[in-house]
Image: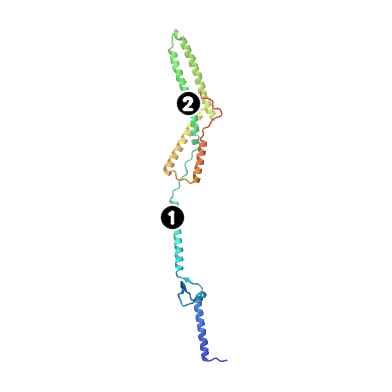
Amino acid sequence: MKRSTNEKAAIILAVSVILSVTACSAEGVAYVDGNQSGTGFSSSSAATSGTIYEESTLPATVSVTTAATTTKAKETTAVSTTVASTPAIPPRPQPSTEAVSYKHLCEIYQKLQEQNKAIFALEKQRSDLEIELSDSKGIFKAKRRSELSTEIAGLEERISRMKARLSHIVKEYGYQNAEAFYKAFHKSETAYGDYQDSLKNWKQRYGEKPQSLHDRLISKKQDIKERELTRPYSPPNRGRSR
């Protein structure tokens, strides 16, 4: 069946229009501001074309993302700078074993000093009696010379016992003799002085910083431990000094 020229022209025109609309739907991009289309396309054509970009949303999203990234980078840099610029505080000085034993040895030392003081007093008394005895001459002072000699002998016996007591005192605390004790005492005295100097310098330089509850508990336990170590030692049988 043959078509007329007008029919052919109409068919060609219709096909051209269809192809034109299809091409625009496939390649066109619609920019929507609110609910109004920026181009002449309908909503269905824009949906068919793929992606719709809202002008008010895209720049804001990019701006917020960039600002957040920049802020995070600045915070990281600030934290790194703060950590790097903060000097490391050395730990608080701790007493050595010799320094801890100093207070205990001081008590023993005090006992020895008291004993030596008592011995010195008796030796002075004996010396005075010996001088008096040497001045007591003649028949009429014979009785006094006898009394003085008896007193001097008694003092010498007491002095001898008290000197022996010095060795017993140090042996009660585990030292072989007085010489061994004094050696340990002077070593401990030096160690304790060094510890006090180190602690004083540490406090002056770094000071006592505010402590958290956890740190205060640890510090309290350490103080209790140090007091236990420096608690006076009492031997089973202390005896008398004189």
x and y, in percent, of residue 106 in the image: 48, 31
Give the residue at x 48% y 28%: 110
Q: Type of residue at label 2?
A: Glu
* Image: 95 above or below 86: above
Distance from disc 2 to disc 1, alpha carbons, whole Å, reads 65 Å
- As drawn, 126 above or below 235: above
Query: The residue under label 1 is which amino acid type?
Result: Ala
Count of labels shown? 2
Quadrant where the N terminus is found in the figure: bottom right
User: What crowding class fits label 2: few (fewer than 14 Cα within 10 Å), some (14-19), or many (20 or more)?
Assistant: few
* Most foreground residue, 4 or 83: 4
The residue located at (50%, 32%) in the rendering is: 105
Label 1's element? helix
Residue 219, x across and y down, in percent: 49, 42
Q: Position of residue 70 (x, y in %)?
A: 44, 60
Rendered view: 53 above or below 77: below
**Residue bearing mark 2:** 114
Which badge, 2 or 1, comes first in the chain's sequence? Answer: 1
Name of the residue lying farthest toward the front: 35
- Work out which residue is located at the far top of the displayed protein and give it: 139
Which disc number belongs to residue 78? 1
10 Å crowding of disc 1: few (<14), some (14-19), many (20+): few
The answer to whether residue 5 is above or below residue 132 is below
